[in-house]
Image (tube, grey):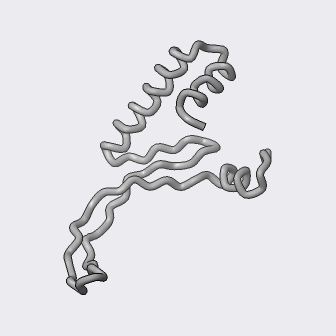
């Protein structure tokens, strides 16, 4: 499902226009990005938790040359799905 189809489906579900739904979704994502930029986690019920994690520096090896390089520390975005989402995906139906 692409973004256009998703917005159309969501707008129908909410009883709003596609434009209103797109604006609302954009504001939701924008607020999530702001929170994640401040390294705060964002928890959405029935979906899961988005969080910024720190990866420590490490030594890596280039397989073709055997050269060892130092990979600097970095921040990565992580997602941990909720238990209910895992169950719904695992069993293919909604578990209430």
Q: Left of 96 or right of it: where is 60?
A: left
Determine which quarter of the picture holds residue 54.
Answer: bottom left
**64 to 14, vertically: above or below:** below
x 56%, y 17%: residue: 18
Above or below, 13 relative to 75: above
Expressed as whole percent of the image width and height from the top left, the position of residue 15 reads 66, 15
Compared to residue 18, the image places residue 71 above or below, namely below
* Quarter of the figure that contains the N terminus: top right
Name the residue rendered at 53%, 32% in the picture. 3
User: How many numbered marks have been drawn onto this rendered protein structure?
Assistant: 0
Where's residue 91, x and y in %?
78, 55
**Residue at screen point 20% across, 75% down:** 70
Q: Where is residue 23 shown, x and y percent of the image? A: 47, 20
> Foreground residue, 16 or 44?
16
Residue 24 lies, in percent from the top left, at 49, 22
Q: Which residue appears at 59% of the width and 30% of the height?
A: 6
* Left or right placement of residue 68 versus residue 8 in this view: left
Q: Is 76 situated left or right of 47 in this image?
A: left
Would you say 93 lies left or right of 47 here?
right
| Outermost residue toward the front in this view | 64
Q: Is residue 81 above or below residue 4?
A: below
Name the quadrant of the C terminus: top right
């Amino acid at each position: 499902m692409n973004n256009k189809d998703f917005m159309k489906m969501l707008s129908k579900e909410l009883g709003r226009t596609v434009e209103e739904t797109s604006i609302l979704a954009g504001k939701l994502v924008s607020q999530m990005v702001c929170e994640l930029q401040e390294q705060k986690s964002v928890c959405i019920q029935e979906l899961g938790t988005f969080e910024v994690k720190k990866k420590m520096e490490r030594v890596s090896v280039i397989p073709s040359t055997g050269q060892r390089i130092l990979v600097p520390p970095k921040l990565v975005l992580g997602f941990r799905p909720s238990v209910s989402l895992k169950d719904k995906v695992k069993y293919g139906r909604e578990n209430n």
